[in-house]
Structure formats: structure tokens, C-alpha cells
Image: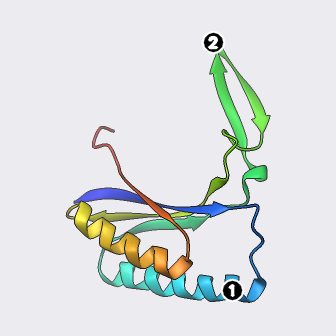
Amino acid sequence: MKHYLLAVQIDETVPEPEDELREQLARTAKVSDEIKAAGAWVFAGGLLPSHASTVVRPGNGTTTMTDGPFAETKEQLGGFWVIQCEDLDEALAWADRCALACARPIEVRPFDDVV
């Protein structure tokens, strides 16, 4: 089994109507339950907006800390699933269902086997 990150991409500049957000959360909860039932579940989580992040940057043997996202970009990481699957095709099938449920793009990335 390989592990895959299903990263939910969001555009924080577009406000989400509360009723649509509730519907998306209900759909994603249902897909999460299906992932659990299939035995592919590892864990998942939603994230606070990018302004709540802190970047710790190394340099010259020390670190600096800055508030906000690492990169200025339109899309931010809004949440994720970590799943275990036999192969990429299975992970992509789950990503397809997740994307439809949350109405957001999903980036699928395999974990490196090196620990």
C-alpha cells in the first residue's frame, strides 16, 4: 500500500455562501465515511485560512518567522485527506469523488517511501 495526499485547493479571495459551504461539508463527510469503509482512510483535516499560518525559514544557521503563507498565490491549501491505496489509479478515483464532493480542485501527490 502507498500513501497519497489529496490536497484541496481553494481560492480564499472568493467568498463562500454559508449554505453552499454547509452542503460541501456534508458531501465531503459522506465521501470521508466511504473512504473509511473501504479501508483507505489514514486521516484528514481542514485548515484555517492562510493568514493564520507562520513560515519558519532557515538561513545562515538560524531561522526567521513570518506571518502568512509561504507564497503569494491565488490558490491556497484548504484541507486534505491522507489515504492508502494499492496504486495511483485508486488514489485518483478517490480524488475524483473528493473533488466532486467539495467542489474544489484536488492535487494528488504520492508520499515518498523514504522515511
**In this image, 40 relative to 15: left or right?**
left
Name the one closer to the observer, 93 or 1. Answer: 93
Please name whichever residue, 95 or 32, is drawn nearer the observer in this view of the structure: 95
Residue at the image point whose x is 69% and y is 86% from the top: 20
The correct choice, above or below, for 54 with respect to 56 in the image is below
From the image, tell me which residue sits under label 2: 61
Query: Who comes first in sequence, dot 2 or dot 1?
Result: 1
- Residue 111 drawn at (x, y percent): 35, 48
Residue appearing at x 73%, y 59% in the figure: 49
What is the x, y in percent for residue 2?
Answer: 26, 56
**Element assignment for label 1:** helix
Query: What residue is pinned by disc 1?
Result: 20
Give the left or right position of residue 80, taking residue 46 as reference. left
* Tag 2 near tag 1, CB within 8 Å: no
Q: Quadrant of residue 112?
A: top left
Kindly report the distance in space between the C-alpha atoms of the residues bearing marks 2 and 1: 47 Å
In the picture, residue 85 is in which quadrant? bottom left
Q: How many neighbours does mark 1 have within 10 angstroms: few (below 14), some (14-19), or many (20 or more)?
A: few
Residue in the picture at 77% in, 52% down: 52
The amino acid beneath tag 2 is Gly
Q: Residue visible at 53% across and 87% down?
A: 27
Task: Give the x, y percent position of residue 19.
Answer: 73, 89
Given the image, on which type of amino acid does mark 1 rest?
Glu
Vertical placement of 111 versus 24: above or below? above
In front: label 2 or label 1: 1
**The residue tagged with tag 2: helix, strand or loop?**
loop
